[in-house]
């Protein structure tokens, strides 16, 4: 018995997929068999074609960056002990290391005073977000987030043939009531980042709790804490408590930012044991490069370096918020290692500012979200990098399209 199921548009020319229910196979196994009408090539699931760019990537034609302030990296680098640990581990690259999860999770747990069984580890928090969405989304189900939140998130939903839903915001920050209004029977995941990227706005723990209270218990709330270590006041304890007391909240964290290990790809998640178990089932057998594993352990141990990165970033954050504001640029109150700059009041087009900066080898980031048309995001680099950026920007604002002094 055959039944036509759905139209597929994977961005290719292929349009129609017939879903066949074969009583024999399906009856015995519960598996639905898809027979494809015409294509003579492998056909990706339909959501794959919907995965798109979320930020302006740097064209190869531009000169290489002299000052790279576009990727929210830690300009101060990792702890020297982390580098040493990675170098030492790199002398044994012929070896697999099994049970990486059981090596790193207890170290993270004892650092934060958490239960190691509630910690999952992975290749950056990106890997955790990929696995969470793979695990809890299905075709036709929804992932809800705020419209101007971390722009990569809709792609996680597309990869699962699920539907990303954007809750509108009056400004750049996520609004709890607007999100709650869009929760439906189809919602499986609600995502927030706090501090968010690119706005850098923090959602207070009380608001996160209110959002959670408004969700049905089968909806998973993901709190992305990639920049949590940079907030003025520590928000961590309240979030750990929320996760510990509930079965449907997780908090993702990363070693890419405050620990300066973006290239090492190490992230972790604190969550209910059942979710940690599900994610561990989906984990690759050897999830991390071994030098990365050792770098992460050494980085956690070097509390002095972490404190230095934090205090220097917070100092520069205040300084540059003031300096940019004096140039007439709107700066969101930042709680991270970057600033969202709005050029609306300067009368200058953000894209032309971006291009003039890039022409001078200074790279900042532009996003493809309509609400961010007038904005650029500046990563807080080292003082001398920011000085070079600042004098180039002042010159560009004063002399639009003028000649570019070489650096
Ligand atoms: C809000 C947010 N979440 C997650 C990530 C992913 O970080 P990583 O995969 O390096 O841990 C980023 C990276 O910039 C981010 O800004």
Image (cartoon, helix red, strand yellow):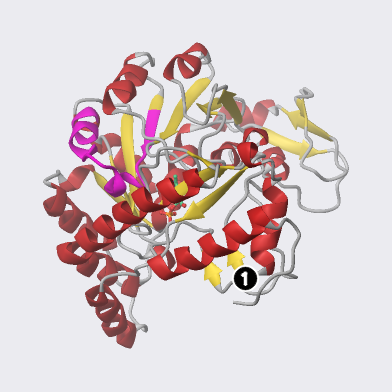
Question: How far from the left and from the top, in percent, is residue 145?
Answer: 51, 29
Question: How far from the left and from the top, in percent, is residue 69?
Answer: 51, 61
Q: In terms of image quadrants, where is residue 156?
A: top right
User: Residue 139 versus residue 3: which sits nearer the camera?
Assistant: 139
Q: Is residue 230 magenta?
A: yes
Question: How far from the left and from the top, in percent, is residue 332?
Answer: 46, 38
User: Residue 172 versus residue 212: which sits nearer the camera?
Assistant: 172
Label 1, ligand 1: CB separation under 8 Å: no
Report if residue 322 is visible in the image: yes
Q: Is residue 40 magenta?
A: no
According to the picture, the residue beneath numbered tag 1 turns out to be 361
User: Residue 64 versus residue 22: which sits nearer the camera?
Assistant: 64
Q: Is residue 103 above or below residue 241?
A: below
Report if residue 130 is visible in the image: no
Quadrant the N terminus occupies: top right
Which span is picked out in magenta? 221-242
User: Helix, strand, or loop for circle 1?
Assistant: loop
Question: How far from the left and from the top, in percent, is residue 371?
Answer: 63, 33
| Residue found 28% across the figure and 63% down from its top | 100
In the orientation shown, which residue stands out farthest toward the bottom? 91
304 left or right of 162? left
Quadrant the C terminus occupies: bottom right
User: Residue 88 versus residue 234: which sits nearer the camera?
Assistant: 234
| Residue found 55% across the figure and 33% down from its top | 148
Q: Residues within 10 Å of mark 1 (few under 14, many from 20)?
A: some
**How many numbered tags mark residues here?**
1
Q: In terms of image quadrants, where is residue 290?
A: bottom left
347 left or right of 189? right
| Residue found 14% across the figure and 44% down from its top | 114
Q: In terms of image quadrants, where is residue 202?
A: top left
354 left or right of 341? right
């Amino acid at each position: 018995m055959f039944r036509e199921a759905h139209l597929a548009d994977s961005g290719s020319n292929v349009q129609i997929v017939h879903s066949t229910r074969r009583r024999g196979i399906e009856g015995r196994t519960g598996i639905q068999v898809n027979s494809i009408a015409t294509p003579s090539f492998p056909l990706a699931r339909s959501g794959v074609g919907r995965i798109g760019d979320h930020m302006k990537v740097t064209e190869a034609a531009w000169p290489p960056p002299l000052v790279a302030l576009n990727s929210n990296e830690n300009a101060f680098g990792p702890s020297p002990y982390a580098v040493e640990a990675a170098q030492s581990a790199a002398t044994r690259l012929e070896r697999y290391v099994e049970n990486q999860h059981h090596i790193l999770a207890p170290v993270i747990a004892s650092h934060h005073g958490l239960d190691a069984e509630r910690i999952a580890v992975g290749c950056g928090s990106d890997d955790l977000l990929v696995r969470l969405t793979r695990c809890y989304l299905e075709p036709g189900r929804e992932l809800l987030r705020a419209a101007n939140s971390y722009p990569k998130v809709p792609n996680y939903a597309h990869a699962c043939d699920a539907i990303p839903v954007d809750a509108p915001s009056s400004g750049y920050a996520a609004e709890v009531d607007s999100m709650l209004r869009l929760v439906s029977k189809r919602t499986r995941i609600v995502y927030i980042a706090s501090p968010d990227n690119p706005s850098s706005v923090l959602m207070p723990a009380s608001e996160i709790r209110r959002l959670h209270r408004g969700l049905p218990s089968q909806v998973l709330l993901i709190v992305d804490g990639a920049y949590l270590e940079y907030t003025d006041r520590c928000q961590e304890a309240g979030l750990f408590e929320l996760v510990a007391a509930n079965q449907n909240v997780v908090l993702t964290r990363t070693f890419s930012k405050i620990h300066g290990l973006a290239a090492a790809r190490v992230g972790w998640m604190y969550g209910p044991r059942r979710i940690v178990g599900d994610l561990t089932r989906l984990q690759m057998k050897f999830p991390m490069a071994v030098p990365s594993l050792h770098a992460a352990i050494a980085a956690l141990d070097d509390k002095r370096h972490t404190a230095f990165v934090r205090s220097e970033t917070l100092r520069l954050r205040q300084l540059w918020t003031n300096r940019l504001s004096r140039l007439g640029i709107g700066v969101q109150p930042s709680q991270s290692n970057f600033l969202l700059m709005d050029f609306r009041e300067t009368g200058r087009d953000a894209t032309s500012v971006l291009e003039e900066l890039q022409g001078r080898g200074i790279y900042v980031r532009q996003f493809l979200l309509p609400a961010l048309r007038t904005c650029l995001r500046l990563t807080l680099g080292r003082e001398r990098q920011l000085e070079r950026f600042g004098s180039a920007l002042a010159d560009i604002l004063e002399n639009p399209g003028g000649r570019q002094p070489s650096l």
